[in-house]
Image (cartoon, helix red, strand yellow):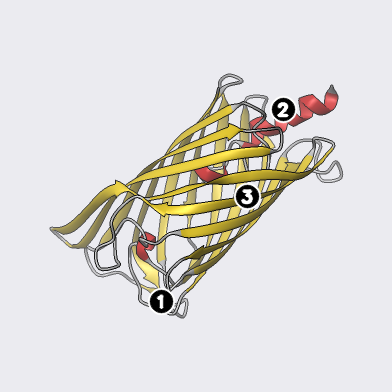
């Protein structure tokens, strides 16, 4: 019984991740259970890093701003196998100079796949693998779109998460993810990413967590695009701080903020997210 209570408490903690499609990380959702996660994300940048990682100041009046809403749906097919679907809607404003802006909006790349729990360690820690497909929900004109790369893709992700070991802390959780994504285009890209998160409860209903993500996208196309959704070759390091509150056993909300302190061929920006967790 104690293990089951610990497992349930860890689940409540781990739903604090700001990335909607990773909201449950390696934790299985549960047989015949549903998870609905609507979220909103804001991102803004004026400066960027060049292909060598050097800081480049943006032109006067130039700014790129992205606002997106995402709907994540999860369904527990069995105790080990889950179906996941994530659909984003983007609204982007690319201000080239004072008084001149380009606005693009629409559905982005849908991610859908299956997550399977390989091993659970006494309901305290879980090792899982997830295989997903990437489907563009927009039309790329001449191979380009402000909403994404316009290509189909696939991703394989290995996840290890659970409660912190007793020798580290008597409460809290951790999550690690390593992923490889490939887009089906001669330009790629091939993407490798890593995420590490540590969270700790500050009261029964509140928590704080910190995560750091590293992304490297490889492509022979080295051109810079201030719109990160349409860029192929880049890298970044992104730390993020999250705060969460559990209202009921079925409803929680989380807010988070992040900054990009270093990158290659990408923007130097900041942003924030609001996430709602609804368990049905």
Q: Give the CA distance from mark 1 to mark 3.
A: 33 Å
Depth check, front residue: 63 or 105: 105
Q: Give the CA distance from mark 2 to mark 3.
A: 22 Å
Seen at 66% across and 39% down, the residue is 81
Furthest residue toward top: 248
Residue 14 locus on image (x, y percent): 64, 37
Task: Give residue 190's mark.
Answer: none
**Label 2 with label 3: CB-CB less than 8 Å:** no
Q: Is residue 97 left or right of residue 223?
A: left
Q: Secondary structure at mark 2?
A: helix
Q: Label 3 belongs to which residue?
A: 130
Q: Label 2 belongs to which residue?
A: 8
Residue 23 locus on image (x, y percent): 57, 40
Q: Earlier in the sequence, mark 2 or mark 3?
A: 2
Around disc 3, counting alpha carbons within 10 Å, would you say few (fewer than 14), some (14 to 19), or many (20 or more)?
A: many
Seen at 35% across and 50% down, the residue is 137
Seen at 84% across and 21% down, the residue is 1
Q: Label 1 belongs to which residue?
A: 50
Q: Secondary structure at mark 1?
A: loop
């Amino acid at each position: 019984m104690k293990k089951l209570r610990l497992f349930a408490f860890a689940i409540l903690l781990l739903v604090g991740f700001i990335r909607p499609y990773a909201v449950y990380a390696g934790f299985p959702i549960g047989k015949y259970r549903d998870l609905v996660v609507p979220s909103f994300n804001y991102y803004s940048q004026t400066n960027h890093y060049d292909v060598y990682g050097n800081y480049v100041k943006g032109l006067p009046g130039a700014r790129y701003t992205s606002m997106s809403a995402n709907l994540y749906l999860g369904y527990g097919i069995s105790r080990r196998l889950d179906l996941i679907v994530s659909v984003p809607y983007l609204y982007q404003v690319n201000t080239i100079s004072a008084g001149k802006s380009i606005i693009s909006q629409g559905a982005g790349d849908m991610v859908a796949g299956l997550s399977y729990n390989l091993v659970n360690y006494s309901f305290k820690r879980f090792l899982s693998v997830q295989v997903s497909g990437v489907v563009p929900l927009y039309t790329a004109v001449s191979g380009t779109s402000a909403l994404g790369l316009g290509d189909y893709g696939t991703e394989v992700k290995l996840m290890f998460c659970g409660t912190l070991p007793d020798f580290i802390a008597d409460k809290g959780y951790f999550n690690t993810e390593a992923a490889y994504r490939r887009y089906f285009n001669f330009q790629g890209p091939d993407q490798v990413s890593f995420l590490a998160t540590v969270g700790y409860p500050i009261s029964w209903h509140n928590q704080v967590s910190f995560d750091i993500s590293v992304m490297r996208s490889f492509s022979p196309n080295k051109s810079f695009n201030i719109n990160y959704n349409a860029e192929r070759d880049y890298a970044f390091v992104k730390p993020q701080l999250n705060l969460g509150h559990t209202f009921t056993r079925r409803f929680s909300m989380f807010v988070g903020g992040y900054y990009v302190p270093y990158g290659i061929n990408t923007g130097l920006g900041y942003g924030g997210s609001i996430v709602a967790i609804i368990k049905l």
